[in-house]
Every structure is written in C-alpha cells, then in structure tokens.
Amino acid sequence: MPRMPVGTVGLLLTGGGARAAYQVGVLEAIADLRLAARVGERGSPFGVITGTSAGAINAAALASYADDFDHSVRRLVAVWKDFRPSQIYRTDTLWSINVEGGRWRVPFGLRWLLKLWNHEPPRSLLDNTPLAELLERMVPLQRLPGLMEAGWLRALAVTVSSYSTGENYIFYQSHASIEPWVRTHRVGIPGRITLEHLLASAAIPFVFPPVGVAMPNGHMEYFGDGSIRQVAPLSAAVRLGAQRLLAVGASRLNEQQNLPRPNVDTGYPTLAQVAGHAISSIFLDALAVDVERMQRINQTLTLIPTSERAGTTLRPIELLVISPSERVDVIASRHIKVLPEPLRRMFGHLDGGGPPGNEALKSSALASYLLFDADFTRELMELGRADTLRQRDAVCAFFGWMK
C-alpha cells in the first residue's frame, strides 16, 4: 500500500568486516526502543540509507525491507547471530605449511604456487564465493524500485573504491531525480544497486578479490572496499536529502587514544600484525574526522542569521553517532581460536584455548575483520545493543519518540 513519502532521517553504516555485527546490535536496540514508544508506523524510520564495506551489506538488507523495519532488523539478527566463517569465505587456497610465531616461512600454498606456475596469480588471500551466495538469499534488491515508488524509501547508497582511478565512488539508487556529483576523490553515480556493488564495497584489500562493475559508459571497472580513500563518509547521506543523520561505527571513534603502553618488549611485528595495522588505518580514521568536520560546520552555521541562510543550501545537520565503547580488537583476541586452522596458522598460534597471549593480541586487529563466527558476532551485537540503550534518551529524542 502506498504511503506518504518517508522523512529525511539518514542512516550511515560504516565498514569493518565482521565488526559490522556491532551495527546489528544497535539496530536491534533501536527497533525495541521504537516498539516501547508505541510508534505505529511499521516502515523504516530511515528515508536515506548509506553503507560502506560490510555496512553496505547491512544497509542494503535494511533498505530491501524498508516497508517493515522490525522484519528487516530481525532478519539481520538471525544471520549475524549464527555466522560461521564458511558462510563468507573459503580458506582452501591458503597454505597448510607450519608457521612459526606468525612469521610465514612459505608465502603461498600449493594451489597458489600452481596458479603462479600456470601464470594465474592469486587475486586475493581468501575466496569469498560463499558471501555472494549468501547475499543472493539475504538481500532482495529487486524490491527496491517498488519500495521507492510507494514512498517507503528515498534512497540507498553504497560506497566503493576504484582500483583503476583511485577515486571513491558512491553508487546510489533513488526514485527521485538526484543529480550526480563530483568532488575531490569522490564521485556520485545514479543507477540500480546490484550484488556486484555490495561485493565490491565489502572487498577488503588483499583479503577479498576486486569486483568488476559495469559503468554507465559501458566499460568494466574494478573496485574494492569502499573505506579506501573515503574522505567524507557522511556526505553521501546529506547529498541524498538527509537532514538528520545517525552514524553507526564499527570501531571506537578515538581508537588510538588512552591506550596502555606495553610493559614488555613485544618483539618483532608479525605479518598479521602489520597487515592488521594497515587495514585498520583504512577503517578507523575517516568517520571520526568527518564527524568533527560536521560539528564544526554546524557550529559555524549557528553564527549566521537564519535570514541570511534562507537563500542558500546551507543547513545544519542533526547528528547522532553510536560507536563501540570497547576496543573491538581486544574482544577479537579472545575469539581467534575459533578461526579456521589455516588462518590461525597464518596468525601464528594454534594453542586452541586459554587466555589471549601476546601473539593473539598482535594479530587481533586483522582477525577482527575476518571473525565471522557466532561467538564473536554475538558479543559485538550485545555491545551494540548495550551502547545504544545507554544512550536511550538521546536516541528517542533524535527520532522524536516518547519515552
């Protein structure tokens, strides 16, 4: 049944591989708060939904059921609470040779070496074919045009990064005509969102293979994780019409602040530790910087009289940010033992139990993006739920719900 067009509340879900389980806990808490407030509307409270990396998958799943928010959230919860790595990737391309202390003696497994011998270099560390199969069942993108035409959703946007040009692309689908845009290192392109866009946005560099997407001019371009060179993650939702914006992170905004200094020499860094540090630098910085930028702009706009802003496009954006209150890599260090054996060999620890040791802590940053395991995802979901309920008053005020 058609309804009045949705409001201008936007949602941003950032990247982070398995860390995106935190977002599902946040959404579950929001759904419960809305139910407690006795909001009669069954559609999504978000008119504009944007996502990056694994957040793009969650965003598309929400958008695909924008006519029933509770249903969309429960579907996400059902998937994330029972995850196993085999639903996301295969490890049979990894080596099975002994590894000492996370220092990889032989860089590639037998299958990989055979491919190199046959002039077929590997495209990535892991094969994410199972993820593509999961998305086909999990995200019915074919529902989007009908939902938008009926007024349940204004726009969905997915961010990717081009390996060809180095630009950050925002592919967006909207029933209304929204002009594409070009800004420094970011380009907005209208069109239908496909599974290829979602796979590309979630293609963590080196870990998952680049994904080809057909461009409007007909040529094929290859993309990877949308967090790469994403300088303004909040901007897409604003350009698509959001006037209030909820941003859900997958890492603490100030991840590097107030960290305890090591009491002992941690030794030479493992390759897993170096890789985790490099990948974390892609995911951790952009949202915090953009939040600070938006807060400064909002503060500046309060100094300009409303009458002088009337003839411009300048407007303050009400912003609510929810992000983990705990270090996600520390949480991950407690769960590394459940990773598939080839990955544990890569990380350099096969003890199989006990408290996290030095090697587990070293490799926990990288592991946190690959821990698609129910024990880890459920703990993150519980953290997301608790962090949201801790901000109960702010969340209800943001949506205009009675407590």
Image (cartoon, rainbow, N blue to C red):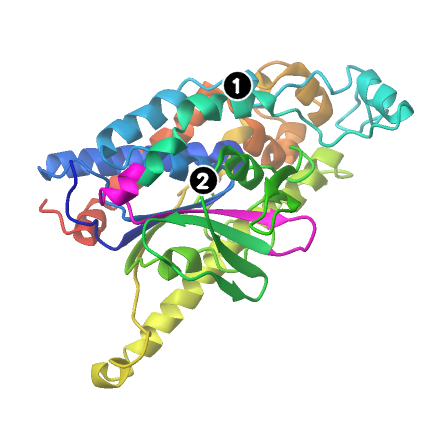
**Which residue is tagged 2?**
55
Tell me, yes or no, if residue 384 can be seen here: no
Image coordinates for residue 333, horizontal then vertical, percent:
56, 29
Q: Which residues are magenta?
A: 146-167
Rendered position, 34 above or below 230: above
Q: Quadrant of residue 178?
A: bottom left
**Which residue is tagged 1?**
87
Q: Are marks 1 and 2 in contact (CB under 8 Å)?
A: no
Rendered position, 338 above or below 184: above
Nearer-N-terminus badge (1/2): 2
Is residue 281 shown in magenta?
no
Rendered position, 251 above or below 22: below
Q: Residue visible at 39% across and 43% down? A: 325
Question: Is residue 68 found left or right of 90 in the rendered image?
Answer: left
Question: Is residue 365 found left or right of 270 in the rendered image?
Answer: left
The N terminus lies in which quarter of the figure?
top left
Q: Residue furthest right?
A: 117
Question: Is residue 59 found left or right of 189 in the rendered image?
Answer: left
Image coordinates for residue 3, horizontal then vertical, percent:
15, 43
Number of callouts in the render?
2
Judged from the image, the secondary structure of the residue bearing numbered disc 2 is helix
Question: Is residue 40 found left or right of 393 in the rendered image?
Answer: left
Q: Residue visible at 57% across and 39% down? A: 200
Q: Amino acid at mark 2?
A: Gly
Judged from the image, the secondary structure of the residue bearing numbered disc 1 is helix
- Label 1 and label 2: CA atoms lie apart by 17 Å
Q: Quadrant of residue 39?
A: top left
